[in-house]
Image (cartoon, rainbow, N blue to C red):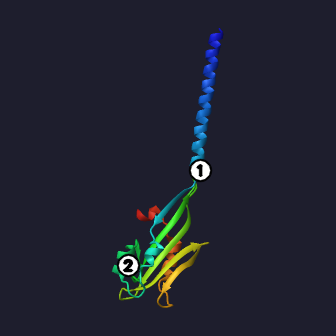
């Protein structure tokens, strides 16, 4: 009888150990699921690459060779190239939140020569100029840049089905 009792006790202890082990794994998975995930979308050239662009002498072709072509070109008059990058934070079942956005705008003259190289950021919902190399004080296309900053990433998949 004592021998039967010790076998039962060992099985109970083994079962309790297995439950503890499975509980630890479940807790680890829950904690890992709550960790934020960061995703980067888009591309902006590095500051060192932008420094290679010479305002007043480079053209669209030389800019394409130095930093590559953007995914968004001038929307109205082909006045410039816009490089857009954003960083999103995904946290559990919550909706993704955009935590950072930057736009690099390279504007050209009508003859295709670089006129301005500017970097914009988004802080507190407002467009903020981070750096600017301008040949003259008149900056064209700021309205387009402001629209890109406000509307990038805000679309409905249903819009593409119609």
Is residue 76 placed above or below 123 in the rendered structure?
Answer: below
Q: Who is closer to the viewer here, 105 or 79?
A: 105
Q: How many marks?
A: 2
Picture coordinates of residue 139, whole percent (x, y):
49, 87
**Quadrant holding the C terminus:** bottom left
Which residue ends up furthest to the top in the rendered image?
1
Judged from the image, the secondary structure of the residue bearing numbered disc 2 is: helix
> Does the CB distance between marks 1 and 2 fall below 8 Å?
no
> Mark 2 = which residue?
63
Picture coordinates of residue 98, whole percent (x, y):
55, 64
Picture coordinates of residue 68, whole percent (x, y):
38, 73
Q: Residues within 10 Å of mark 1 (few under 14, many from 20)?
A: few
**Residue 82, visible in the rendered structure:** no
Name the residue at 49% across, 63% down.
Answer: 40
Which label lies toward us, 1 or 2? 2
Judged from the image, the secondary structure of the residue bearing numbered disc 1 is: loop
Q: Which mark is residue 34?
A: 1
Give the distance between the C-alpha atoms of the residues marked 1 and 2, in whole angstroms: 43 Å
Q: Residues within 10 Å of mark 2 (few under 14, many from 20)?
A: many
Picture coordinates of residue 119, whole percent (x, y):
50, 77
Q: Which mark is residue 56?
A: none
Can you tell which quarter of the image residue 58 is in?
bottom left
Sequence-wise first label, 1 or 2: 1
**Quadrant holding the N terminus:** top right
Is residue 100 placed above or below 36 in the rendered structure?
Answer: below
**Residue 160, visible in the rendered structure:** yes
Name the residue at 58% across, 34% down.
Answer: 22
Which residue ends up furthest to the left in the rendered image?
61
């Amino acid at each position: 009888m004592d021998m039967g009792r010790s076998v039962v006790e060992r099985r109970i202890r083994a079962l309790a150990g297995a439950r503890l082990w499975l509980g630890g794994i479940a807790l680890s998975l829950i904690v890992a699921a709550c960790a934020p995930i960061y995703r980067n979308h888009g591309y902006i050239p590095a500051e060192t690459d932008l420094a290679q662009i010479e305002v007043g002498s480079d053209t669209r072709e030389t800019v394409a060779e130095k930093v590559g072509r953007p995914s968004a070109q001038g929307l109205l008059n082909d006045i410039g190239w816009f490089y857009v990058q954003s960083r999103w934070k995904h946290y559990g079942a919550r909706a993704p939140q955009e935590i950072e956005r930057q736009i690099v705008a390279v504007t050209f003259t009508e003859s295709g020569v670089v006129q301005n190289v500017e970097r914009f950021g988004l802080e507190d919902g407002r467009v903020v100029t981070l750096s600017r190399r301008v040949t003259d004080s008149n900056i064209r296309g700021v309205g387009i840049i402001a629209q890109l900053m406000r509307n990038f990433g805000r679309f409905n998949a249903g819009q593409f089905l119609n």
